[in-house]
Amino acid sequence: MNVAPTHISAASLDDREISLIDRYWRAANYLSVGQIYLLANALLKEPLKPEDVKPRLLGHWGTTPGLNFIYAHLNRIIKARDANIIYICGPGHGGPGMVANTYLEGSYSEIYPEIGEDETGMLKLFRQFSFPGGVPSHVAPETPGSIHEGGELGYALVHAFGAAFDNPDLVVACVVGDGEAETGPLATAWHSNKFLNPHTDGVVLPILHLNGYKIANPTVLARLSDEELENLFKGYGYEPFFVEGSDPQLMHALMASVLNTVFDRIAAIKEHARVDASQRPRWPMIILRSPKGWTGPKVVDGKVVEGHWRAHQVPVAACREDGEHRRILEDWMRSYDPEDLFEDGKLKAELKALAPRGERRMGANPHANGGLLRRELKTPDFRDYAVAVPSPGSVETGSTKILGDYLRDVIRYNAEERNFRIFGPDETASNRLGSVFEATDKVWMADTVETDDHLAPEGRVMEVLSEHMCQGWLEGYLLTGRHGFFSCYEAFIHIIDSMFNQHAKWIKVSSHLPWRKPISSLNYLLTSHVWRQDHNGFSHQDPGFIDLVANKSSDIVRVYLPPDANTLLVIGDHCLKTWDRVNVIVAGKQPEPQWLTIEEAEVHCKAGIGIWEWAGTEEGLDPDIVLACAGDVPTMETLAAVDYLRQILPHLRIRVVNVVNLMALQSPQHHPHGISDEMFDDIFTRDRPVVFAYHGYPYLIHRLVYKRTNHRNFHVRGFVEEGTTTTPFDMAVMNELDRFHLAIEAIERLPALKDKAAGLIATLRQKLAAHKAYVHEYGDDMPEIRDWKWPYAKPEVPAAE
Amino acid sequence: MNVAPTHISAASLDDREISLIDRYWRAANYLSVGQIYLLANALLKEPLKPEDVKPRLLGHWGTTPGLNFIYAHLNRIIKARDANIIYICGPGHGGPGMVANTYLEGSYSEIYPEIGEDETGMLKLFRQFSFPGGVPSHVAPETPGSIHEGGELGYALVHAFGAAFDNPDLVVACVVGDGEAETGPLATAWHSNKFLNPHTDGVVLPILHLNGYKIANPTVLARLSDEELENLFKGYGYEPFFVEGSDPQLMHALMASVLNTVFDRIAAIKEHARVDASQRPRWPMIILRSPKGWTGPKVVDGKVVEGHWRAHQVPVAACREDGEHRRILEDWMRSYDPEDLFEDGKLKAELKALAPRGERRMGANPHANGGLLRRELKTPDFRDYAVAVPSPGSVETGSTKILGDYLRDVIRYNAEERNFRIFGPDETASNRLGSVFEATDKVWMADTVETDDHLAPEGRVMEVLSEHMCQGWLEGYLLTGRHGFFSCYEAFIHIIDSMFNQHAKWIKVSSHLPWRKPISSLNYLLTSHVWRQDHNGFSHQDPGFIDLVANKSSDIVRVYLPPDANTLLVIGDHCLKTWDRVNVIVAGKQPEPQWLTIEEAEVHCKAGIGIWEWAGTEEGLDPDIVLACAGDVPTMETLAAVDYLRQILPHLRIRVVNVVNLMALQSPQHHPHGISDEMFDDIFTRDRPVVFAYHGYPYLIHRLVYKRTNHRNFHVRGFVEEGTTTTPFDMAVMNELDRFHLAIEAIERLPALKDKAAGLIATLRQKLAAHKAYVHEYGDDMPEIRDWKWPYAKPEVPAAE
């Protein structure tokens, strides 16, 4: 291996220090192996018997010794420099290592007192690992000191940067496995350094751990020359330092020496940034090449294991049945010399002294249990931003613009706390949230030019054309106790489907751990939505994220479809004040009719669903038909359909229902927001036809209401995967969600209209034909459509019940 | 801007050549602007009037002139070297540019004769763009020469590599926008060069187009120094060449010169690879820095436009209403001097001569209409791989292992054609498809060491720890007329949700274009599925991809849940022979009971759904209850429940139904595979309770059957988001999908059993309690569970109707 210029000298620790740190490392390795293998005989006081070994061996050894090595050395530097460090373990498979280290430093037993620092506790520690009723095999919410699951790979580095933002004294050490390094999200995450302010943010110290192999293959980066690696990471904007080898003594000395240099570099950068934070520093990073399964069995059944992908999981497997395998395991565990490490099952005092104390222990750092540090967000009174709506439909405005005004002031109110950021893939302005730039800038540490606009090293808005980065930064920011908001084009939020899944799983588990304090909710604003992507075309038209969200645990997820600006204000304000949830808000950015006053909006949002008496024609009698809607465009089309129906069928008794909280439709046993069956029947009737205009794929409504009395009379229209570049109204027509199709559906569902129906429908079909002819001629919607307004004054007194 | 060593001299074209290529470029720019703006007056024979301008201006100018510049220069090199090139346009917003160029070279009018090469045709070309009933604003299936939509960003480069594999004579020029370059999938896609064989594969020529801005921000890569960029791309393994500037004359000379050098490099690499393909070459790539909106309006309303993000979309907007805006537009269009370019609306002959001929035109290259080149896959007789099943449940085997044997021979049968590859994120062996390595290797062009296993420059299996790369390579491979197969852990296929969406959209549109010939289906095998991720834990447990797929157009998607190896063989063989679809197969890799003989499997898969008479106890009478199942684990648990029920309720008439083709459940008007209502009623009865054990989230079954007569008696159990590291059976218990819960549900649904029910249920609950106690003690499932086998012999004669 060639030695690049950034390889540095290894003279740092004396022999005694090396011996101590090596023993500490061996202790962590011993505990890691014990967790994977042992049911009994934790300290190997007796020869290993078959029944000492777990019947099912689950766990991943391969990455673990390297993780333990890093942990021990970070402990050293924390103590030496009183550094404030958290440890992000990208290779989440290395669960046993993180558990072992937090146990050694004592933070584990503080959180889980039943796992004491003695022989009994150690045995419990071993048994519970990957065991039913115990702890998962991966780094998980249960693991002290972790904000990162590491089950699905790709997000270690974005989580690290998210944690570092606005934490100027924190160093986030982030171990990136060479498997994970092949993923897309990780490959772009290196560029996060263009968004890190060296003065007001903390430090991310990436440690690329090249142990050479994935499950069954070498890794790409491990098979590059040091020269290519050095180019790559210099190109990414870092100063790489190499730590390479397999001899533990030499590696300890080298790692200590590199960490000294790296922390000197960090100190110098921070020092300089205090004077001038305008230039992007070249942050140090470490490339650690060490063997996979380091210090584990060299050969099993004649096949190389240490330093090979065979070390990935359980390196020697048949230890109950096969005496030779069991001997290999016993020799392996004894090679760490447990008697030299533990006394009565407790880590020896001279080793314990190597661990940091109190909150400096990485398993007890409060940043990794962000709820401990979370402060309530300060919010202005949302009513101050309300749109005046003298009468329904009498004014038009873009709803997200109004929310933007509110968010601008949220930023102002929390400017001092520096605990709120807005994230988005280059779309904050496009999504009409531009008012926020009256209060702040976009973070930017790359080069600037004179014509740049609202770019600054400091700012509360983060924009990068990577939904993965936006999502991951935000997750890291929330998990360390802050607040945030992610606005995104609706179709492209699918890019982070899997990240959402993993975050929802994290919240589900962590919210049941009493020692994990609640974190702020992850709030999405999905705008530039399916019905307003007529200009961009089919690739930009997809409302399916809601379906994904609806599959997750009901105590975690909420979906809101505010029909106008005032409802959006109420919902937005509410979501920012919640915790341990994922809130999805879908709302349009284009000018659209406003329906409710702010007072009405509050009532409506609180109920989640309601009858819009001012729009219907029930007049206190039972309705003939219910026209329901969820979403801004479906609401407008429904009201336009009602307008037509009122004109052509003045005696028809129509009820109009609007749904703002989608989960209210579900049965209360399926979702805490579900309204009671009685209320559902009151609203949707027990037997009248319901024509439901829904923002997304129509099946979801059927799925949500399938337990309800009247569900078989639900006729749902929504997006049925028809789209292209066309006009806004034509998008609705293509999917038969427009006013004319809704009116036709209503007429068809009313047998009493049988005689008139054919004529009425023919008239409506003529309107559809006229629309098609017009758009094909002029490329725009007919003025009759574009300029349609709700023509009815609001009744002075609400209609009687 | 500093000049890096790879900047090369610009002396290449003489003045006449420069003038010609510049005029060609201006023609493309003129046509691009015309498409965005004009309804009439195509050649500006008269002064521009308000009514000449489209009422709605939709399109993206910013990236287009750069794309046109590249197109013109690629044309030159194609002609000069008879190169076989296709053009992947990452910045899909540049739709007008791709349309303009294919129109100029004549390929557009060949495909769309109504858009002729004359003034009338030009006007039609302008009108149809971004117009209802016309063509989308983006590069799309409708665009000749394209295999890449470019609406959602991130996949240009993986598509390019997918197209290049096994096409040794093809050069795939791939324009990567600097916005797209920020995405994760694109950032890792650069590493695809470690998987490209220089001898047997084609060439990918990446052209990173730094035009500086996204929608409203500078791009990260554009704000790096050339030195950092050079490091970055050398680190990625390329030799970067810079083309930077804004003066057209200089830029033409420079681009031509760089392309000459680049194609010399390519020729040298290919030449060397003929002798020795074992070393990874450093492929050339181009970094083109040119202004956004190059040659467009410099300033509008006092604000800088050219070279700024304001040029992104429509640079001057109010051209109907505002005379000054209209003047800017007219000046801009006239600056290209249309009279110097067109004669009677036709490109002048000396310019037309610059375009390549026939299939060398990038809009007519058959590789970009892959169905033209597609040959049927040769497949062995799947029956030869069948598992012998003397009696249901009498043998156990891992289903994917059997499919792996079949796939091995598919590889052998098509070895000469080199038109079939298997893709997966490091999981081919883990997913038990390892037999394929008897026939081939994994492609690997990075460094190797002695202990490596089945890594070779040539191979049919592609493994990299990036689902994005696997998916993108496969898409590119299919779109250019080949066949493929993607095996993936079920939970992590969500990583490519959005890519699946976009591919499904592409197929939906392209399958309606007569000139686009069908391409092979995209086949997924999802294994290591939710019920067999007990060892990896909650993060690895998610069956939701099926729900996403079910939202797409029914003519495109298929979902199969084969319950055993023989059904998997039938389905796998079928899927490989289909076209223009996405097939999702979910099947387990662990040893599991085998139910059907291959003959029975064929019948069952053909029907998609069927009554398993050998398992039920109807005996020709109406059943009391239906136990239905879909998926391998649900099938096993259902049969085990039936076994218990048969023991404790010998007179109960149970029907067992298995669903292998999920779409068969849907109404025929919703899906072409949906069985008729009559058949559905025959199978599921009109009024008996149906206890349905389903592989995924239970709601999907409700959604699929909500139109069916008996749907209100469906009681569906599936994954309800409960998971952790535990035993396989405990996963089923946590989600109440196990044999005991199914039996309890059945008993509860039968009012006739009322008297006995409490006692029976108590017994079953005891079994559940015994299970919990056992797993908490031993960490493994009870032998009674693990060793359960279907105990009934198969009736000699099938039960009567």
Image (tube, coloured by chain):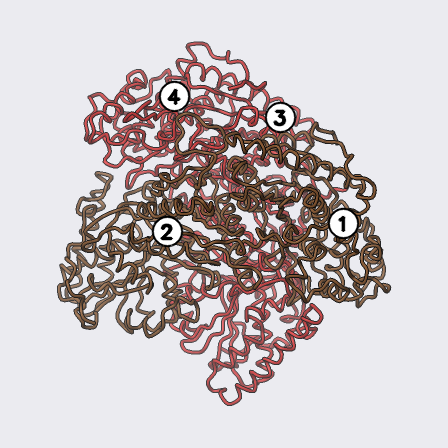
Chain colours: A red, B brown
The amino acid at mark 1 is Trp
Q: Is residue A458 visible?
A: no
Q: Residue B460 carries which label?
A: none
Q: Callout 1: helix, strand or loop? A: helix
Can marks 2 and 1 be said to lie on one chain? yes
In contact (CB < 8 Å): disc 4 and disc 1? no
- Residue picked out by circle 3: A270
Q: Residues within 10 Å of mark 1 (few under 14, many from 20)?
A: many
- Residue picked out by circle 4: A25
User: B445 or B680, which lies in front?
Assistant: B445
Q: Callout 3: helix, strand or loop? A: helix
The amino acid at mark 4 is Trp
Q: Is residue B702 visible?
A: yes
- Residue picked out by circle 1: B25
Q: Sequence-wise, which precedes: disc 2 or disc 1?
A: 1
- In the rendering, at what x and y percent does residue B315 appear? 76, 54
- Residue picked out by circle 2: B721
